[in-house]
Image: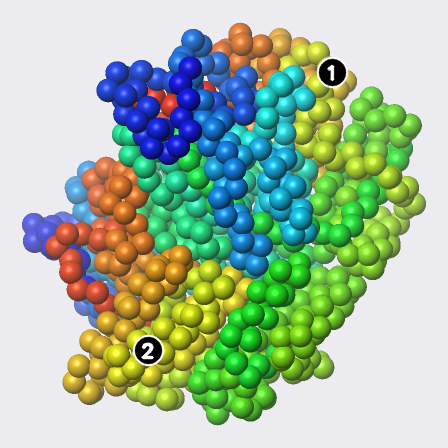
């Protein structure tokens, strides 16, 4: 994956730039090689690059001063939250300032009356929930990296999770964002009222992958925890039967809090990894959560049991919290379990129309033969977000290249059936060169012009999201070696 | 007036307008033409022919339609499959005394959502993708036709609430949801403003997923003493009964059940259609509602979204005062219905801080550099 060429003139001015940043943030500039090595990658760890310098501001005024300096001096900026991006969104540049937001981690206000929390960008996703759960509330988006990932990063990536079908992505759970624009101006978009009095720039900025500015404050909505949650495990003799069941559940009017699909290879790998008790011999498994008030949940559960039976499946319900947790622990360990099957794997993140699932799975099996590599599937079936895991061995000549080619073919397939390249991981550098598969030239030019409206100098996260003519190699994806994930303590789904 | 009945004709029209540097007004159903700063004597581009559902996939929870498809048509087609649009579109035609037909693009472009916004979000939360023609006369696409997508910039968000100032929409894909089988309206009558809004906020932060929470003072609703807190709950039969019981338990007070649903008239502004004066929507943090209402000190108002929006009617001379109260509460006062003069003077929203205003202008120019589309409306 090629990034725009390094500007050697900027690299030559490194000492001067470091000194200028120390003026702004005396206690927060990392410039020594061992310190910088901490920041040389994110969770797309096949790619490494030492930043020119890393600066860790502790307030919005410092962020503003840094961006003003960068704008005046023409130095690229790469924003970073916790560095858990799966698409290389926070990959540094040799000629760029990496601006790490981890020190701005105060929860500024908890406002139960208005159902919101005001936070700095470095607060972790899970810490928002932790701050309010004693009072029965939580923050709904739950990306798998939620114990580590920050809310600023969630805004940048429009992070999802297991419960998007019912509760939406990050963008649906925000009321306000304060950001520093390229050049240092500070703007507030929305607030506790949610109203912006102009264009919905908050919606635009959410999911903009660090290309438009740096988020310094966020107002998130919090929700009352559902009083009842029940979990069902449904097993099927065939993948199409499971696919049809998903469609039937949706068509019936049930909106599960989560609905996860696993094919047989995935379920077997997980079963041998942490024994969640998945039924043996099933070709496909669904995990379905229903939440709400007791009667709502009972209604949904009885509908789901009926529909599963009509689709030829069998249902088992978790009898207690412990069993619920066990069923989900399997799903959440899918990544690590796959890692036991082969030394390396990559995880894809396409979204497809749900009805295309059986045909996509069939096509993927053919692609697997074509590329001579195994794979398995976990899938947020409720919202059509597919996470195929391709397994390979870097030590075998050509396998890494074949795995990447297989991955790119899968994403092309997703687009071909009416889907998209990314359901929740973002484009970053990983899928950048496939953007032309999904978008026409005029689509991309329009997005480029929006980028320029914010960042006329093109200094923010250059080389991410949008393909450049010079780049031609398709690759990327989450690279896992020897079952060691980047951030191995995080579940990945 | 020119008519464009196909995306190709829109492209052709925009290219000609661009060549002649001739701004124009975009009209679909025509119900919301008198909202926002007035567009005087501009040529019209009538896109009402771009109407009709293109593809409805109930099991995928999406519908793709042409922009001028009437809201009523969408609602009835979706209802056949027991579904509804992802947001609660508000038809302002009674408020604005319009004979037109409220359309999908009109509701989305004007960010017009009714009482259900509380639960379901606005058009921004359910517009998944669109096709449009920008000010360069190029057809482009934003978003997608799947329910979960983070690929590229989220341009659908920008289209919602842009009042047609960014592009001419030619196709829209919305998320749809199952339609609840039953609804119940509970009325907590004869409560003060403070107690009424407090009750609504208590329900808002419960797990009851209310579909409407409004407070109406005596002047806006008959036979409710000093005022009424109205609660709309939805669900299948048994869950709904349970939610009603839980709501009673939460508030610890007796509530009547009302047969007729007052929320469509509340959320669409219809309650104000026969009142004189300008009609405003003041969007604030819900807990500020009692204080803001007191400061406003007006006779005709109501609070929806648990207090997050105050609808009011006021004399034109009150504009500056209303804007100031909204600004002091860190909210936004939107001038929804007013004379041409008032709208020209006060605009749809208060002027934004300079940096934000400049950013809005830059984003507008990124789509429409010559300012051809509805210039100055937003």
Q: Are both tags, 2 and 1, on one chain?
A: no
Q: Which part of the image, by quadrant, shows the N terminus of chain A?
A: bottom left
Tell me the chain of label 1: B
Residue that numbered label 2 is attached to: A366
Horizontal and vertical percent for residue A132?
63, 59
Left or right: where B8 falls relative to A122: left
Q: How many marks?
A: 2
Q: Judge by depth and name the residue closer to the eye, B331 or B377.
A: B377
How much space separates mark 2 and mark 1, taking CA atoms? 66 Å
Left or right: where B29 falls relative to A455: right
Left or right: where A153 falls relative to B262: left
Q: Is residue A364 visible?
A: yes
Q: Which mark is residue B162?
A: none
Q: Judge by depth and name the residue closer to the eye, B198 or A392.
A: A392
- Identified at 10% across, 52% down, the residue is A7
Q: Nearer the viewer, mark 2 or mark 1?
A: 2
Q: For residue B316, what is the image quadrant?
A: top right
Residue that numbered label 1 is attached to: B274
Q: For residue B75, what is the image quadrant?
A: top right
- Identified at 55% across, 79% down, the residue is A285
């Amino acid at each position: 994956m090629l990034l725009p060429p390094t500007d050697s003139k900027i690299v030559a001015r490194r000492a001067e730039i470091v000194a200028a940043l120390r003026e702004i943030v005396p206690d927060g500039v990392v410039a020594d090689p061992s310190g910088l090595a901490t920041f040389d990658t994110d969770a797309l760890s096949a790619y490494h690059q030492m930043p020119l310098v890393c600066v860790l501001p502790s307030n919005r005024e410092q962020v503003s001063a840094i961006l003003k300096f960068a704008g005046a001096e023409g130095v690229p900026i790469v924003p970073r939250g916790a560095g858990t991006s799966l698409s290389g969104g926070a990959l540094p540049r040799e000629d760029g300032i990496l601006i790490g937001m981890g020190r701005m981690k105060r929860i500024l206000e908890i406002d139960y009356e208005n159902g919101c929390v005001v936070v700095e960008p470095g607060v972790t996703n899970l810490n928002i929930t932790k701050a309010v759960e004693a009072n029965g509330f939580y923050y709904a988006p739950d990306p798998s990296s939620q114990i580590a990932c920050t809310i600023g990063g969630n805004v940048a990536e429009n992070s999802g999770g297991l419960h998007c079908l019912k509760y939406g992505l990050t963008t649906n759970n925000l009321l306000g964002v304060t950001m520093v624009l390229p050049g240092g101006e500070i703007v507030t978009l929305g607030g506790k009222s949610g109203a912006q009095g102009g264009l919905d720039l908050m919606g635009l900025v959410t999911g903009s992958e660090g290309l438009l500015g740096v988020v310094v404050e966020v107002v998130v909505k919090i929700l009352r925890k559902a009083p009842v949650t029940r979990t069902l495990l449904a097993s099927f003799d065939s993948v199409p039967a499971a696919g049809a069941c998903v469609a039937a559940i949706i068509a019936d009017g049930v909106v599960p809090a989560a609905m996860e699909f696993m094919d047989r290879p995935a379920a077997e790998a997980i079963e041998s990894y942490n024994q969640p008790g998945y039924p043996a011999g099933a070709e496909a498994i669904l995990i379905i959560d229903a939440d709400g008030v007791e009667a709502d949940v009972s209604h949904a559960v009885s509908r789901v049991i009926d529909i599963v039976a009509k689709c030829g499946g069998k249902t088992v319900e978790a009898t207690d919290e412990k069993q619920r947790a066990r069923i989900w622990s399997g799903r959440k360990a899918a990544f690590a379990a796959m890692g036991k099957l082969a030394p390396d794997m990559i995880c894809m993140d396409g979204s497809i129309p749900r009805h295309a699932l059986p045909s996509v799975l069939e096509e993927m099996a053919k692609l697997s033969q074509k590329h001579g590599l195994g794979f398995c599937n976990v899938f947020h079936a409720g919202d059509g977000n597919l996470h195929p895991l391709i397994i390979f061995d870097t030590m075998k000549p050509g396998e890494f290249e074949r795995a990447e080619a297989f991955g790119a073919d899968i994403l092309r397939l997703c687009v071909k059936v009416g889907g998209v390249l990314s359901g929740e991981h973002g484009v970053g550098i990983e899928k950048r060169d496939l953007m032309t598969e999904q978008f026409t030239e005029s689509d991309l030019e329009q997005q480029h012009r929006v980028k320029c409206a914010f960042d006329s100098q093109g200094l923010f996260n250059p080389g991410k999201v949008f393909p450049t003519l010079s780049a031609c190699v398709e690759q990327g994806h989450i690279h896992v070696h020897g079952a060691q994930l980047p951030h191995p303590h995080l579940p990945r789904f | 007036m020119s008519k464009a009945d196909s995306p190709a004709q829109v492209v052709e029209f925009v290219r000609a307008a661009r060549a002649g540097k001739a701004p124009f007004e975009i009209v679909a159903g025509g119900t919301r033409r008198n909202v926002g700063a007035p567009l005087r004597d501009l040529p019209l581009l009538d896109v009402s022919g771009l109407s009709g559902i293109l593809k409805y996939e109930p099991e995928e929870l999406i519908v793709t339609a042409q922009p001028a498809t009437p809201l009523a048509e969408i609602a009835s087609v979706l209802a056949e499959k027991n579904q509804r649009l992802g947001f609660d579109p508000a038809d302002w035609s009674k408020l604005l005394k319009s004979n037109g037909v409220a359309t999908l693009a009109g509701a989305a472009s004007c960010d017009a959502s009714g009482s259900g916004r509380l639960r379901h979000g606005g058009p921004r939360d359910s517009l998944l993708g669109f096709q449009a023609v920008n000010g360069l006369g190029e057809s482009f696409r934003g978003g997608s036709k799947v329910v979960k997508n983070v690929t590229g910039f989220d341009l659908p968000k920008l289209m919602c609430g842009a009042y047609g100032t960014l592009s001419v929409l030619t196709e829209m894909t919305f998320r749809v949801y199952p339609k609840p089988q039953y609804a119940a309206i509970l009325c907590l009558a004869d409560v003060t403003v403070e107690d009424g809004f407090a009750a609504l906020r208590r329900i808002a932060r419960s797990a009851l997923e209310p579909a409407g929470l409004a407070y109406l003072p005596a002047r806006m609703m008959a036979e409710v003493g000093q005022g009424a807190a109205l609660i709309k709950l939805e669900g299948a039969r048994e869950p709904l009964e349970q939610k009603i019981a839980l709501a009673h338990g939460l508030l610890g007070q007796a509530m009547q059940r009302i047969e007729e649903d007052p929320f469509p008239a509340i959320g669409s502004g219809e309650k104000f259609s026969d009142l004189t004066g300008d009609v405003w929507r003041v969007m604030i943090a819900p807990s500020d509602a009692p204080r803001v209402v007191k400061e406003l000190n007006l006779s005709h108002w109501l609070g929806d979204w648990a207090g997050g929006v105050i609808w009011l009617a006021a004399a034109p001379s009150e504009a500056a005062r209303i804007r100031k109260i909204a600004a002091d509460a860190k909210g936004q006062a939107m001038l929804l219905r007013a004379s041409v003069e008032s709208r020209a003077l006060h605009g749809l929203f208060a002027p934004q801080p300079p940096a934000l205003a400049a950013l809005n202008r830059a984003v507008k120019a990124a789509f429409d550099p010559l300012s051809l589309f509805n210039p100055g409306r937003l």
